[in-house]
Amino acid sequence: MDRRKFTRLCSSLVAGASSLSLASRAAIAASENQSEAASDTAGVEVAGRKIRSTQLVFPNGAPVTADSLAEGTAYIFHFPFKSTPGFLIRLRSDARQTSDKSSPVTLTDKNGRSYQWAGGVGPGNAIVAFSAICTHKMSHPAKPVSHLNFRPEDKVYYDRQGQQQNGSQLIYCCSEHSVYDPFEGARVLSGPASQPLASIGLTIDKDDSLYADSLYGGDMLEQFVEKFGFRQAIEQNLTDPYETSGPTTSVVPADEFSAMQILC
């Protein structure tokens, strides 16, 4: 990035910070006045920006379909902003029974508000998506390194009561050792995380193409962009970290997205 482009980026980020912050607070205040349950954000404003359905595509432009995703594998995409990473995971249904959409999972955010995670989509409801921002200190997959990773293999962890547990296909934050269960809406199993990872709603059209169309639960978007937006803008070549994902967003295997994955 040349000096003039870098200067323009700095100016635009600084100039927009106050107005976006005000818009963010207004959006949060409006949502708090709606209901105690976390609401779907599809088609409404988040941090002052309109969120719309976004098609998931591979870097070559090919649409992501259920059959194109490898089982037991995590992918990275960005939604609802180009600076905010998410996990797209096709869980292995042979390892654990995937969630039944007829039996929603009830979760609670850090403010004590309840919401329901209705499960995944696709064959066996095994395709799920979550915000890839740890709810403790906002560790996330970045291009140089990731401390937040999906682990398909069987591993030992210690729950919040200090009891040893075994589990597979879990999301681990190796920064502060939080563990999330994607079979249960990214419920917190271990560590200091304050709430589940925010859920990203998925839909599949008649051509079997996948779309991200909502975000619900306790999201960390505003805090994340305030803390990491400048760095994310440089990494993702953005002039505005609050730029929405647009009509399409690229999906990349997690082990290819980050140059180094810190495993624990």
Image (cartoon, helix red, strand yellow):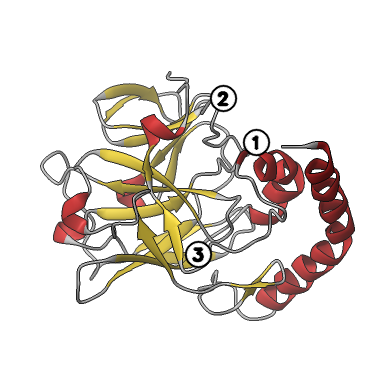
Query: Residue 117, can we see it?
Result: no
Instruction: Please state which amino acid type lies under the numbered disc 3.
Output: Leu
**At which x and y percent is residue 222?**
70, 55
Query: How many C-alpha atoms fall within 10 Å of the one at disc 3: few (<14), some, or many (≥20)?
Result: many
- The answer to whether 109 is drawn above or below residue 27 in the figure is above
Instruction: State how far apart marks 3 and 1 are (Cα).
Output: 20 Å
Q: Return the residue nearer the eye: 8 or 122.
A: 8
Residue placed at 59% from the left, 78% from the top?
A: 44
- The answer to whether 258 is drawn above or below residue 228 in the figure is above
Whether residue 104 sits left or right of residue 50 in the image: it is: left
Instruction: State how far apart marks 3 and 2 are (Cα).
Output: 24 Å
Q: Return the residue nearer the eye: 239 or 25.
A: 239
Which mark, by number, is residue 175? 2
Do the CB atoms of the residues marked 3 and 2 lie less than 8 Å apart? no
Residue placed at 20% from the left, 77% from the top?
A: 206
Do the CB atoms of the residues marked 1 and 2 lie less than 8 Å apart? yes
